[in-house]
Every structure is written in C-alpha cells, then in structure tokens.
Amino acid sequence: MTTIEPQELTVTPHPETHFDVVIIGAGSVAENVADRIVQGGLSAVVIESELVGGECSYWACMPSKTLIRSGMALRAAKRVAGAKEAVTGELDVAAVLARRNSFTHDWDDESQVGWLEHAGIALVRGHGRLTAAREVTVTATDGSTTVLTAGHAVVVCTGSDPLLPDIEGLREAGPWTPREATSAQEAPASLAIIGGGVVAVEMATAYVSLGTTVTILARSGLLQGQEDFAGDLVAASLRELGVDIRTAAPTRVESTTDGFAITIDGETLRAEKLLVATGRVPRSSDIGMEIAGLTAGDWIEVDDTLKVVGSDWLYAAGDVNHRALLTHQGKYQARAVGDVIVARALGKPVDDAPWGAHVATADHEAVPQVTFSEPEVASVGLTSSAARKAGYDIRVIDYKLGNVAGASLLADGYEGQARMVVDEKRKVIIGVTFVGQDVSELIQAATIAIVGEVPIDRLWHAVPAYPTMNEIWLRLLETYGRPEA
C-alpha cells in the first residue's frame, strides 16, 4: 500500500519580517483570514510547514468527497429504471483514484501559492511558534529561523490532528489516520474502522464502493449527536452495501505481516488496513501558547470576534478553537476575524452584537453539516434532544422524503426522512435534518430559515417549485398545520 507524499518544499526567506498581521497556518481558514486583512488595506503573512491549502484541500474535504462521489453516482443511476439497464459494469477503481489525485494536484500546492501571490499575501515556509507578544519565530526545514513581528495581531489557524484512543498496541501498530485513508493509491482488500462518526461512515462508504471489505467498530453506534434516525438509516444502508457494523470497542491492536490483528470481546478481527476515526485534538502543543498564558495542547478559547480570551492581540480561527470543526464554519470565522482586526486597527466601529459583521454567531446554534455517507445526512441547527436540553419548548415534525413527488422522480423507491424542530414560543425553526439521496442540496434553505428566524407563517409564502425535492418544505408545513386566519 502506498500513499502520496507532499512535494519537497524549497525554503526561500521572505525579505520582509514586519507585517500588520501574522497568521500561523496556511490552510483554507488562514487563507480567508489573510484575504480579508489584505482587502481591508493591511499587510498579512501566512506561515506553513506543509502544503498551502491545508487539510481540506489535500487530506480531508476534497479528496474524501471525490473518493465517495463515483460510487454514489453509480448507485444513483441504478435506482432509475431505464438508466439501470444501461449500467453494465462496476467502478473503475484506478479511475476513481486518479480523479481524486487530480483534485489534490498530486499533493502539490503550486496553484495555491500562486493564489497567495496574486492576492498580495506573503508566505513564509516553516514551523511557526509564538516567542513574544506579537512575535512569531519560524523555523525552516534547514534549521534556519526568521522572526516575524505583527503590528496589530497574530492569528492561530493551525487546525487539528487525529485523536488516537488509548488502546493497547494501537500507536505502535501504525494505523491509518484520515490522511492515509484519503491519499491511498490502492484500495485494500479489507479495512477495519474504529469510530462511528462522520469520517468513519464516509470512509466506509468510499471503500466499500471500491470493493474493499469494510468493518466498522463503533461502540456507541453511528453518528452520535445527530438525530437518532440518521444513524439508523445510514447503518441500514451501509449493511446493505456489505459493511459489517459492530457496536464493540477494541481492547488491543497488533501489527502483523499481512495487516492488523484487532482484539474485540476476546475474538480477533484481521484486516489489511486499520483506520482510526475517533475524533480530533487541537494542533496547539508546539506553537508557543505559553507566551499568551495558555496551556500547550489545549483548545484555544475565544470570544465571538475570535479574539483569545484575556488577550488584546491574539486570535484563533478554525478547528483549533473547537467552536465548530467544519471547513465552512472555519471560513465563516475567518471572514469575521479578518474584518474585525482591520476595524480595530483602523479605529473603525466594531459590530460585535449577535449576528453583527464582526462575530461568528452562527457557530452556536445554526451550524450546517453534511455527512456524505450512503445515504447523505444534512442537518443545521439543533437536534430535537439538544433543543430540549437547551430549554426550548419545541414541536418535532417528521415526514418521509419518499412521499415527495420530486424524490420519487429522483430515484425509484426513494427512502429518506426529514425532521423539523420548531421553537413554539417564537414560531420559528431551530433545527432541520434530512437523510436521503442528494439531500445535501436541500440544507441551505433550512440554514437561511434558521439564521433569518423566518416565522412559520411567512414560510408558507416560500412556494417550492414542483416537482422538486424542495416540496418537502410544503409537506413539513402542512404537517405542522396552517396558520389561523
């Protein structure tokens, strides 16, 4: 089994060492912070020890969804009479992997570096550490150092790393993390996955499509934290595809000559590859957090303007602040923090009231998320259990997606579920979950309804086009009940 390694990086010292804003990291969040800083008239530099573009571009969002897409497209064709008769073969695994490689540019960041240059953002290669207030020392691969100073702010955008649970022998056995799973150049004959969250079900969906025998080891079941029916529907579908799902936790892992031996309840499961997908930890252990009075290795606590609590110059955006570990929420935070740094630097008014221009209010109760499993799970806002726990007086509305005309056109025998959670006091939606084929394209309407706090009575006037999947909105409202005259 082989994986693609990043290209060797050439270290070129930057001629300037003082900038208005210094950003540690150069992933998608850091890029967006820097772009807002520069557009606001200030100077910015990003520091990167790996590839410009970060986890999302090379080891997470884009390669993982590319691996999943081909199998989903093939199964979608097989669900439509007339099309399924024309499908005569199975996936071309080599072509799927080649397509994935094209999306990562073969793990070369030349195009991303070009974008930085075009945007007027400086880049320094190496590992950045805070060494004083508003000062970051960058150590290059050759051991040389560059000291960068910031006139106004330093922003930490270092992201997160995979969590390896405390299982005997696991670390020494050398399992896959999500990075190896998304960059592998061959599909293994068998794959065991420890974990039942988003990464686990997405990689199970991808690899079972590639012909791999997949076993999921999820002690608490699948997709905990989502509505209960989401995990149930995904589990049923994955089992239909051939995935073995066990609600058990490994107690020991050993590396063998042909893969891994995993001890579960006294029995041994053997697999060619083992993927650990049990969560994330902050990438903050070696970036000088002590300078700001913080503990190395901890999540970084910030306020809604993304400023580190207790500091007047340090900010953190993206995974490392633990608000919402999703690329799109990190970019959302990036826009807020970039703009608020500019406003504070130039003495302009700061709009830090809820839903203001300089805050990330949506992080709290309006976060959209899609799990690209089979079937897809798309959700935004609070689940019914989270809403009750938060003290809301709610009404829960359920509707089968297969009963919508647009769904029956999309796939023969369409199966899926929709849930709407309504705050009865304000008569607004505070949570929506869709499970089914292609539901990822439905979630933005729900996001707008929740963020805009659109009254239920007004939503009746948002007429869904017929016959599309969006008719689900009419069915949910009808089930809820028409407004009284």
Image (spheres, rainbow, N blue to C red):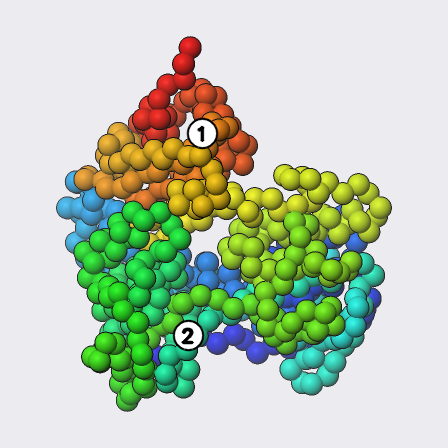
**Which residue is identified by label 1?**
424
Question: Is residue 338 or residue 252 the one in the foreground?
Answer: 252
Tell me which amino acid carries mark 2: Pro
Q: Which mark is residue 165?
A: 2
Q: Is residue 57 left or right of residue 483?
A: right
Question: Is residue 256 or residue 126 the one in the foreground?
Answer: 256
Mark 1 or 2, nearer chain start: 2
**Quadrant where the C terminus is found in the figure:** top left
Find residue 17 and report its horizontal and vertical position in percent: 81, 70
Q: Residue at x 42, y 34 (%)?
A: 394
Measure how far apart labels 1 and 2 are at the Cα level.
41 Å
* Label 2 crowd (10 A; few <14 / some 14-19 / many >=20): few
Q: Residue at x 35, y 26 (%)?
A: 480
* Label 1 crowd (10 A; few <14 / some 14-19 / many >=20): some
Find residue 377 and report its horizontal and vertical position in percent: 36, 48
Q: Secondary structure at mark 2?
A: loop
Question: Is residue 338 or residue 93 the one in the foreground?
Answer: 338
Find residue 461 and report its horizontal and vertical position in percent: 44, 19
Q: Residue at x 67, y 66 (%)?
A: 24
Q: Secondary structure at mark 1?
A: loop
Q: Give the label, 1 or 2, closer to the camera.
A: 1
Determine the image quadrant of residue 400. Answer: top left
Q: Farthest residue toward the top?
A: 485
Q: Is residue 446 visible?
A: no
Vertical arrangement, residue 480 with respect to residue 142, above or below: above
Find residue 330 and report its horizontal and vertical position in percent: 57, 54
Q: Which mark is residue 457?
A: none
Q: Is residue 238 left or right of residue 432?
A: left
Q: Is residue 174 left or right of residue 26?
A: left
